[in-house]
Image: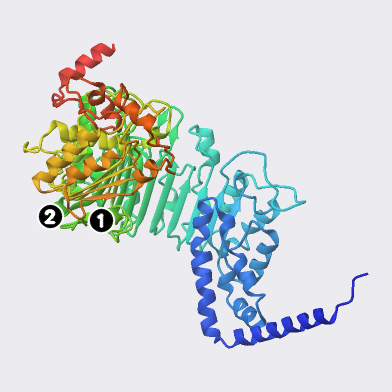
């Protein structure tokens, strides 16, 4: 038997009741128009906007649909307002059966948005087979406004949608049939996410999107189409809609010829976003083009005036051909992920790179005529043993004032109101053993004219080797130095370097003294060194920056009158005298040197939290430095010490001694082919 409530408990209950009544009265004081605006904001920002985005990213359960249900329980007044708008209940939470039925009822006849999940094991299955079929029925399809169908795995291990319910899903063939049975007059957004494409004809018939989808009639309101891991042919009626957004991700052979691509895009004049990413098959890269031949009419060019975002992932030569015939405003954000195949020929590799550079020069020609350049660039010149390059450029303008001193170090170009990247290029060469005399970074930075006016340059590298006991990969000693890669970049005022790029920069400066007219970055004002080792790290194979050579380079540039500020951030060392050495090189200017104070922590015997544990300065460690240790306090050895010959190229850009690579020739290629035979 439960205990009877005491007088104290009764008082508490009475007080809470009074508070609840008072809360109702307070809530009812808000005009219904104001409450409607608040609820509408909740729906549009937190539910409708995030609905397909969360579903597309596999985070469907993060959609805060329960917020609406909670609102109806606050008070009677709130409930009446929340139930008065059918639109707010139109995004069905199909991972919860009871909630789905509740939302369908409250949405009345308003157009719906929902997910049909028939096999994505990473996401909870939303409904049983019967309820999935109900969503795709004759009664529901005319109401569909946004539809996302995913069956991204053929795994039979399915999660139950709810406890005590047997997991069951519609077969993919059945969903295809249902989608083809009824029209979708209200459909505005469609996302179809299938399994990994099987390139066999049988799989294409099974997983391909039928031309009879929605009874073969193009949905008149369709403006967003996202296809992933599914085969779709360019003749499909979905590609004839008045699309503003078209994403074709992990696909292949959608367009048989370049003519087909141009004909398809010509019917999409309002296109704002275009993503075309080919899938990587087991035996190499496929392509969105079945045939790489250029259009039958070489004067057949297409301009997309409203395009804001273009993302292409394909073979380098195919991307170049697409860009040669498809044009768009220079304000469009361009992302190119290209895979090159050189077949071991330096000439063939160079021709492909120069071809893309020529296309980019034509695209940005008007900007160049106006004196506009990419003023802020982040670049990874090389990674690993193969020739790769990642480049991100933003702030395409005529002039750009680079912040100096401490303001430059605190300035984050990614959040400085400059907007997103307008140009992002990733190029890798998959088949070459290594053709270092044809450097991707060197050709791009020298041949793409819109990159000649860079003011802020960040050179990054894979510095995870600093935290590993394994040696970094060995790279050829004949890689071009930064003096060759960045020969055309004469306006750089701000330079940010990590460990390996700092070593390559230091080595390149050593090859070109200050009185040399080809000095690297002659107008450099601010230098940032971050996460570099200034003295050896015990147990690690990576060599540090040489402090003496570093100080000589700094003093040389300060004497020229350009270098004003140096910042050292997150670097490791076991000798605090380095600060005095660098301070002396930078001079006595108020903002000449910024140090993050880590040397003091090291001197006190403390460690850093950057994943690198430096050696604390003790009497024993100082004695070791005086003997035969690995502490690189001497200048680089010009007679061929490995520090100056090979290790500097670990960042991919450092070069060998000061020697130009000879111009490529067909004779070289013939010799290479003969040797390979």
Secondary structure state at the residue bearing disc 2: loop
Residue found at x 78% / y 83%:
11
Residue found at x 10% / y 44%:
559
Could you say which is closer to the camera, residue 265 or residue 180? Answer: 265
Please provide percent x and percent y for residue 28: 61, 86
Q: Nearer the viewer, mark 2 or mark 1?
A: 1
Could you say which is closer to the camera, residue 333 or residue 563? Answer: 563
State which quadrant residue 543 falls in: top left
Q: Does 461 sit left or right of 350 as displayed?
A: right
Could you say which is closer to the camera, residue 110 or residue 537? Answer: 537
Query: What label does residue 451 carry, if any?
Result: none
Could you say which is closer to the camera, residue 531 or residue 256? Answer: 531
Please provide percent x and percent y for residue 427: 31, 37
Label 2 or label 1, whichever comes before in sequence order: 2
Secondary structure state at the residue bearing disc 1: helix
State which quadrant residue 257 falls in: top left
Residue 294 in sight in this render = yes
Please provide percent x and percent y for residue 557: 13, 43
In this view, 56 is above or below 550: below
Q: Residues within 10 Å of mark 1 (few under 14, many from 20)?
A: some
Q: What is the quadrant of the N terminus in the image?
A: bottom right
State which quadrant residue 459 falls in: top left
**Mark 1 = which residue?**
406
Q: What is the quadrant of the C terminus in the image?
A: top left
Q: Would you say the residues marked 2 and 1 are in contact, meaning their CB atoms lie under 8 Å apart?
A: no
Residue found at x 57% / y 57%:
62
Q: Residues within 10 Å of mark 2 (few under 14, many from 20)?
A: some
**Mark 2 = which residue?**
371
Residue 486 in sight in this render = no
């Amino acid at each position: 038997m439960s205990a009877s409530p005491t007088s104290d408990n009764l008082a508490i209950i009475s007080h809470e009741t009074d508070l609840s009544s008072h809360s109702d009265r307070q809530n009812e004081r808000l005009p219904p128009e104001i409450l409607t605006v608040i609820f509408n904001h909740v729906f549009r920002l937190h539910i409708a906007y995030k609905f397909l985005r969360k579903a597309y990213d596999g985070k469907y359960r993060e959609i805060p649909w329960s917020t609406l249900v909670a609102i109806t329980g606050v008070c009677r007044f709130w409930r009446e307002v929340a139930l008065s708008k059918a639109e707010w209940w139109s995004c069905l939470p199909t991972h919860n059966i009871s909630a789905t039925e509740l939302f369908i009822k409250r949405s009345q006849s308003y157009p719906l948005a929902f997910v049909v999940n028939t096999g994505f094991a990473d996401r909870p299955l939303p409904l049983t087979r019967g309820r999935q079929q109900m969503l795709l029925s004759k009664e529901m399809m005319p109401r569909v406004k946004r539809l996302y169908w995913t069956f991204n795995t053929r795994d039979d291990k399915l999660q139950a949608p709810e406890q005590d319910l047997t997991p069951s899903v519609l077969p993919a063939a059945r969903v295809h049939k249902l989608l083809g049975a009824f029209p979708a007059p209200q459909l505005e957004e469609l996302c179809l996410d299938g399994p990994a494409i099987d390139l066999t004809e049988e799989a294409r018939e099974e997983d391909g999107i039928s031309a009879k989808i929605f009874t073969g009639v193009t949905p008149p309101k369709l403006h967003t189409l996202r296809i992933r891991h599914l085969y779709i042919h360019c003749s499909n009626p979905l590609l004839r809609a008045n699309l503003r957004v078209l994403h074709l991700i992990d696909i292949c052979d959608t367009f048989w010829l370049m003519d087909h691509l141009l004909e398809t895009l010509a019917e999409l004049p309002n296109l704002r976003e275009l993503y075309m990413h080919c899938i990587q098959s087991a035996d190499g890269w496929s392509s969105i083009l079945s045939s790489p031949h250029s259009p039958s009419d070489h004067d057949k060019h297409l301009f997309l005036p409203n395009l804001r975002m273009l993302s292409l992932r394909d073979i380098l030569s195919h991307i170049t051909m697409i860009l040669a015939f498809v044009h768009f405003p220079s304000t469009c954000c361009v992302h190119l992920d290209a895979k090159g195949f050189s077949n071991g020929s330096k000439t063939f590799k160079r021709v492909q790179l120069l071809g893309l550079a020529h296309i980019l020069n034509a695209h940005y020609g008007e900007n160049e005529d106006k004196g506009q350049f990419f003023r802020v660039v982040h670049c990874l010149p090389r990674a690993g043993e193969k020739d790769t390059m990642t480049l991100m450029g933003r702030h395409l303008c005529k002039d750009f004032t680079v912040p100096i001193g401490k303001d430059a170090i605190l300035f984050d170009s990614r959040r400085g109101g400059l907007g997103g990247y307008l140009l992002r290029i990733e190029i890798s060469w998959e088949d070459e053993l290594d053709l270092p005399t044809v450097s991707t970074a060197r050709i791009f930075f020298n041949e793409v004219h819109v990159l000649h006016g860079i003011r802020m340059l960040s050179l990054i590298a894979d510095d995870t080797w600093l935290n590993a006991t394994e040696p970094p990969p060995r790279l050829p000693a004949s890689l071009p130095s930064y003096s060759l890669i960045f020969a055309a970049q004469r306006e750089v005022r701000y330079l940010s370097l990590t460990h390996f790029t700092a070593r390559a920069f230091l080595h390149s400066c050593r090859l070109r003294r200050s009185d040399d007219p080809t000095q690297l970055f002659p107008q450099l004002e601010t230098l940032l060194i971050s996460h570099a080792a200034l003295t050896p790290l015990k147990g690690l194979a990576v060599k540090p920056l040489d402090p003496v050579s570093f100080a000589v380079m700094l003093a040389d540039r300060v004497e020229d009158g350009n270098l004003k500020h140096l910042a050292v951030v997150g670097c490791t060392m076991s000798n605090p005298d380095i600060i005095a050495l660098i301070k002396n090189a930078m001079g006595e200017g108020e903002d000449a040197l910024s140090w993050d104070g880590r040397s003091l922590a090291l001197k006190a015997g403390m460690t850093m939290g950057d994943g690198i544990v430096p050696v604390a300065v003790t009497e024993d460690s100082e004695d070791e430095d005086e003997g035969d240790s690995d502490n690189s306090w001497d200048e680089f050895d010009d007679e061929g010490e490995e520090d100056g010959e090979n290790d500097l190229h670990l960042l991919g850009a450092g070069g060998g001694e000061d020697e130009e690579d000879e111009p490529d020739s067909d004779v070289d290629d013939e010799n290479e082919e003969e040797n390979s035979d």
